Amino acid sequence: MAYRPDQLTKEETLKEIIQGHARHSGGSPYLLAVHSDRVVTYLELALRMDEWRREVTRFPAVFEGRLGLMIEDPIDFAVTFVALLASGCWVAPVDPALGALSATHLGVRLAPLELTGVISDRPAPEGGDLRWRDIHVVEVHREVEEGVERLDRSGGGVVLSSSGTSGTPKVVALSNRQLLHTARLVAKHNELTPADRGFNPLPLWHINAEVVAVLSTLVAGSSLAIDDHFHRTDFWSTIERLGVTWINAVPAIIAILMNLREGDVVPGGLRFIRSASAPLAPALLAQFEKSVRIPIIETYGMTEAASQICANPLAGPRKTGSVGRPVGVELRLRPIDLDANETSSQPEIGEIEIRGPSVISHYESTALGDRFDDDGWLRTGDHGYLDDDGYLFLVGRADDVINRGGEKIFPREIEDVVLGVPAISKAAVIGVADEVFGQVPVLYVQLHGADRGTAEGDFEAVFDDAHRLLAGVLARARRPVEIVVVETMPTHATGKIQKKALHGEDVIVLARSAFAW
């Protein structure tokens, strides 16, 4: 029999979890491919783990450092990722699209990770100085081999490099213990059982998919369907065919799925959709649940906390606009320093600080050491406030706060309002220099289906709707001075808008209008 939900908090190692599933439910599926009939069972995962552990024993010099993992096929990526972690290796998942770069450019992109080798299903670039190994493919047997040497390696984990939203390069190392700690919390919070089947279209080289999808599924003994990316065509029929009970998503996907097409039928077995990685506008959440009638569990996390900090309860009050309550971490608010002439519409807002078993104690990037205090609290760089029930509401990043003549304006208070305009699919507010006020907010939006052929009158209608909505909610001093319609917002792989790139040459402006209040 498979592990029961009440066993999810046990402190088994990753190797022991895999072996336990292989013994009790080896023929049960762990991973499923969306566009083929390929299935990886728990027994097959155990065999793959054993093969990699033998490789580690035979070639310790190859595996002793940090291993880049650059595999295009998502099933092979996930299996190899889990097997290497269980073998005590430090794994650095890398976007497989980088494999198209030259050896020189690839070396520059991977330099912050300080890799000693790369495991890939792509040929090694010519002229590179990294050790490069092909993905290890083994024949699958029907029973676990006897006499395979079992390594007792307590090390291992994941190493990730990201500029995040601050633009400062960050290298984060999370141990297997930290990864599993969060995976167990996610599985328990989502009430996962062996009967559940998740669906993950998010990139596997990001912490969210690694922990929330791949590892939480593993500790729960359930199964996971993995897609290489999100496909809108036949989405709901695919979810029905695969028997999916929950979806790991981001707001960009939720926005696309909000409008059901003719013939779309939402499966009755779908329990919830988990949203993370970027802010979810209250208007979008309300419209989605009204249209699709599937609850959205909004969450908040970051790489430094192994992907999860807060989550709305699955059973219990889910507060619109809130990312929920802390799950497995300590959280507090650091007061925002205000000058004598500065004011804030919400004085209770502070910078979020966290600590706990899943939170890193330092960055591999030494330049970011000032983010930690002597008691281990990490400054996240996010601003928010807590209500009387302990629910956290995010208002923006510290770097994004706009100081308009001494008044602090948080971009999200404008973005959440304007996303109530049906034609607007994405919104981002940035501060621009102003001779009188120092800074003023400018609103960038992306419209559903708008391109360079869109009629001028369509833009005017959007401007009017946005103007009317903002005027009815925000004080005059907090409203944007201009609205800019762009063809496509620059985003990260998880859908988070890259605000620093909005002035870039690749951003195509379709229309703009100054707002007179």
Image (cartoon, rainbow, N blue to C red):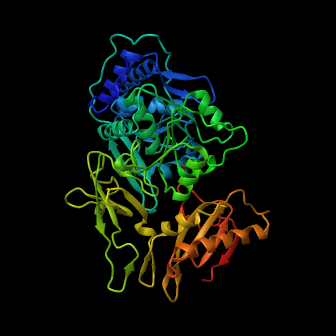
Write the residue at 35% across / 68% down: 349
* Position of the C terminus by quadrant: bottom right
Note whether 158 is above or below 395 in the view shown.
Answer: above
* Image spot of residue 111 (x, y percent): 44, 51
* Image spot of residue 440 (x, y percent): 52, 79
In this view of the protein, which residue sits in the foreground, 424 or 397? 424
Left or right: 216 in relation to 252: left
Give the tally of numbered discs.
Answer: 0
In this view of the protein, which residue sits in the foreground, 132 or 333? 333
Left or right: 364 in relation to 444: left
* Position of the N terminus by quadrant: top left
Left or right: 79 in relation to 353: right
* Image spot of residue 196 (x, y percent): 46, 29
* Image spot of residue 182 (x, y percent): 34, 41
Task: Specify whether residue 117 is in view.
Answer: no
In this view of the protein, which residue sits in the foreground, 187 or 20? 187
Task: Specify whether residue 243 is in view.
Answer: yes
Write the residue at 42% across / 80% down: 407
In this view of the protein, which residue sits in the foreground, 281 or 250? 281
State the residue lying farthest toward the bottom: 436
